[in-house]
Image (cartoon, grey):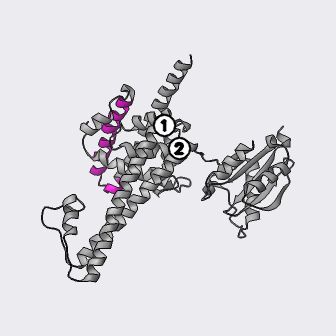
Amino acid sequence: MKKDIRFLGLDVHADTIAVAVAEANGQVHSIGVIPNRIDNLRRLVRRMGRVESLRACYEAGPCGYVLYWQLTKMGVHCDVVAPTLIPVKPGDRVKTDRRDATKLARSYRSGDLTAVWVPDAAHEALRDLLRAREAAKKDQLRARHRLQKFLLRRGQLPPDGIKAWTSRHLAWVKTLRLGQQALDATLLDYLTEVDHARERIERLERAIDHAIAAAPAEIRAVVDGLQALRGVARISAATIVAEVGQISRFAKPRQLMGYTGAVPSEHSSGESIRRGTITKTGNAHLRRILIEAAWAYRYRPNIGRNLHLRQEGTSEDVKAIAWKAQHRLHHRYVTLAARGKTKQHIITAIARELAGFVWAVGVTVEKQQLSTKRAKAA
């Protein structure tokens, strides 16, 4: 019964968990701080009474979803809540772990907290792998910049006709001798780091291919379907699926747009309407992928060789959505450019609308997968 439910607020840290409970009769009190260990967590759950009457929550953060899996395995209903959507009193200037846990318990009981999507094991593993590649790409860019600026300071410019970071460019760099042992040692170190970054990315991309091949059929189907969109290749499609999860959990495309954080901020009152820059209060990894893909819609609608290969085996419904996206988004780009908008603003707007087509493709593929599964079960 609802009157028997106890709401637990957990303020989680690497070593400790501050615990507070909100009773159904209105009392909210702190229980204390326990070590962040599975044995202590089990003792806490036993102390709280029947697991069927417990509802626990904690903020999403660097500790991940380990606590969520531990509590659900014990039979306790647990929600991971969005930290930025927790109500805050403007005059509250005292912050402690116990107070945070108490506030969580009270807000959880009143229904003022917003739960985030918790990925399953397959989604989380793929997401971690893709984020590792993203980190490797950033490290590669830094390594290249260090080598490039070092050569620039020494007056070493590549010969005409050689593009940066091609095989010819790296072969030219390896032939350089700067005349001093210290400079040659520095060049070798920078060049070795560039080679290491390239090998690291290649290794991770091979691992991503294996992970996608070993993923559940539902994940593979959505990854293949999203590749029908222009500018969305294998890595981009896998990143979207890993970051979003089940796309149909968003009832409308605007909800997915909001999840990307690419929607404009607004501060309106009365007849005054003021909109500002994008909120960025969303998934930054997803927003980056969509913005990168949006640059492909600068060009006129066309199905090139690579896109044609990606669309092989895709349903006609998905192909129709992808073709409509090309016409719609390119027309949008031309229209905004004619108004004098900057390229950055235009591409951000295109990325926001591209999220809507991602939603349409994802929902279509997921419905097809569900129909196939039901047909096999029948």
190, 307: nearer the viewer = 190
Image quadrant assignment for residue 39: bottom right
Mark 2 is on which residue type? His
In the image, what residue occupies the spot 20% across and 76% down? 177
In the image, what residue occupies the spot 22% across and 58% down? 167
In the image, what residue occupies the spot 25% across and 78% down? 153
Q: Is residue 120 left or right of residue 38?
A: left
The residue at which mark 2 appears reads as: 123
Secondary structure of residue under mark 2: helix
Q: Is residue 213 left or right of residue 24?
A: left
Q: Residue 228: within the magenta? A: no
19, 325: nearer the viewer = 19
The residue at which mark 1 appears reads as: 219
Q: Position of residue 241 (x, y in %)?
A: 47, 42
Crowd band around label 1 with a 10 angstrom C-alpha radius: few (<14), some (14–19), many (20+): many
Q: Which span of residues is magenta-colored?
A: 318-345
- Look at the image and tell me whether residue 79 can be seen: no
Q: Position of residue 245 (x, y in %)?
A: 52, 42
Q: Chief secondary structure of the magenta span?
A: helix
13, 205: nearer the viewer = 205
Rounded to the nearest angstrom, the CA distance separating label 1 from label 2 is: 8 Å
**Mark 1 near mark 2, Cβ–Cβ under 8 Å?**
yes
Secondary structure of residue under mark 1: helix
Q: Is residue 101 above or below residue 364?
A: below
Question: For the C terminus, which image quadrant?
Answer: top right
Q: Position of residue 223 (x, y in %)?
A: 43, 38
Mark 1 is on which residue type? Ile
Which residue appears farthest toward the left when viewing the image? 160
Image quadrant assignment for residue 33: bottom right
Q: Position of residue 221 (x, y in %)?
A: 44, 33
